[in-house]
Image: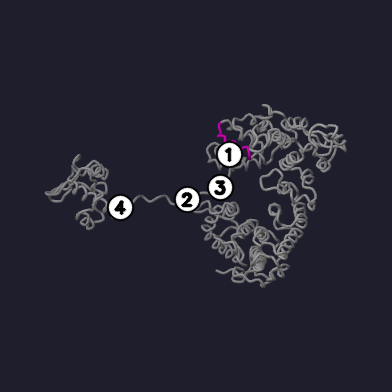
Amino acid sequence: MPSTRNPLTTTPSGAARDARAQPANGPSPQHLGAPTGANGTTSPAGAAQATWSDLVSAALLGTERRDPPVAIRPGQGGATALLDAAAVSTVRRRAALRPAPAGERPSPAPADPRPPLPTAARRRLSLLLADRGGAGGSRRGPTPDLTELLPQWLAAAGELGYRAPEALLPALLDAARARTDLRSSALSLAGPRALWLARLNDDWKYALRGIGGPALPGTEDPESVRALWEEGLFAERVAMLTALRRRDPQAALDLLASTWATERAEDRLMFLDSLREGLSAGDEPFLEQALSDRSRNVRATAAELLSALPGSALAARMTQRARTCVSLDRLAAPSGTPGPRTDATPEPVGPAIHVEAPHECDAGMQRDGVAAKPPSGRGERSWWLGQLVEAAPLDGWRERFGGLDPAAIVALPVADDWRTELHDAWCRAAVRQRNADWARALLGAPAAPSQAAEVAPGGSSRDLAKLLTVLPEDERAGWVAEFIAAHGLSEAFRLLGVCGVPWSEPLGRSVVDALDIARDAGSYPWSFSGVMGLAERCLDPAAADHLDKLTALTDEPEGASPGSGGYWSEAFQRLVGTLRLRSTMHAELRHPTAPEGNPQQPTDTHIHTPLAEPTD
């Protein structure tokens, strides 16, 4: 037999079959390949050598280079003897493993003192978790989408202080694992027992990171706080710093400052972001030092936080720089007239804003967070100007413009086509500084003809959705309702996304009226599927009875998209069915004494869905 052949890869001989007859309590697996004498007894000398590692080593080197550590019968080659010993060892290792010491029992699951779910609500949660895969497809018919109802159900159950049923904890953890938007509410409902399970199953380890993690030490236990800060996982440290910031802002800042110099750049950025909550003048010295950080992202975040403090030194420096660039010209030419005045330039017509963008980005500006290199397609001077104006406190512009209020300042013409750049910067400043007066002025009247063109895509500096978040919730909903009534739904999807849930009655009515108008006009129906989905989640369930008339199948107008009538009918049926199902779910949660088998049912069953009645 050639020495390059590995005998452990060939078919075993009859010795392997003989091994099956050996008793289960045979020799130790480490010596199952030990050489035997002529009478079949194990050789003591060979037994010490014939470990599994010895068999593998002999096979790898080849029997011609190393004698196998087994007895060789007359007429039997070394490779065959080695193969037989390996086969016997393998079979016995599989059939006669020695029992290992019993592992330590897990500690019992902690108690959860919160009240259990009502019977009907428990059944509803089981249905929602079982159907979390969704119906799929672009046309779902009239059946409510349970995947969109699960987040609302979890939030409502959490607000009422219930705990999740123990039997449904695995399914709840699986759902939260698949959908990160569910994790906060799902882990809150699941409580401490979900964390107990997560320690026993690697698939649920996410529950131990960040949201829903172990209880954080209180400020009354500074030693535990310090130990977790110095030894904990990154997610635990972020969670603890955030929680401590809410309870004791200065203590959180002191804790962060104690290890700031040794933290990684990406960690410093996350820790710095936690200072947004409770930001005050007491944070200014630390943030000023962070302006000299070696990480560009950390410097930019520190500058952003400082600019949100109107009384900070950075805000004062940015105000001074911005004032040298923006001023009031009381004898200005009409807006849009570029360059210096000549004999052909029209006579001045009134006050206007004059803009002189910076000619350089010096070291001081860069230290204060101004990025020197503009993005592709942007000019350097306009890029620097926008950053200066964005970081300057908005209240300082009143003095600069002779006491004018924000609405009057925004209404002023801007010379030399700088209006868009200047107003975009003011929009970003209003969002950063949460200044409602300036947000109102920059939003303008919702019914103005120009407003439809002002809605910019997400991430743009002229983002009406971001400006709306600065306004109180009721005012925000009223503004969007008037915008939809004037301009329709084509530009309103992102604006609806920042409105409170459930929608107020005027906002809900304007959305439904706009959908009805779009149907009657024969509009392409699938382009409104996003708004329809929002309506299913955000309309007040009490509106269901008023929408019945929209569920009828109507004649398609001339020029309408083929099949649009059926789609619109199904969409409104699904809307009504979903609203009634949401009403039922809330009733199930708020009626804990509902008798078994007779949960709260919708009062109107005109729109029937197979999910309207919970079953076991």
Q: Secondary structure at mark 3?
A: loop
Can you identify the residue that label 3 sits on? 213
Q: Amino acid at mark 1?
A: Val
Q: Which mark is residue 225?
A: 1
Can you identify the residue that label 2 sits on? 202
Which comes sooner in the sequence, label 4 or label 2?
4
Q: Secondary structure at mark 2?
A: helix
Marks 4, 2: nearer the viewer = 2
* Contact flag, marks 2 and 3 (Cβ < 8 Å): no
Q: For the view shown, which residue lies furthest in the bottom direction? A: 606
Q: Amino acid at mark 4?
A: Leu
The magenta span reads 262-273
Measured as percent of width and height from the top left, residue 184 is found at 60, 51
* Contact flag, marks 4 and 3 (Cβ < 8 Å): no
Q: Which mark is residue 97?
A: 4
Q: CA distance from mark 4 to mark 3?
A: 39 Å
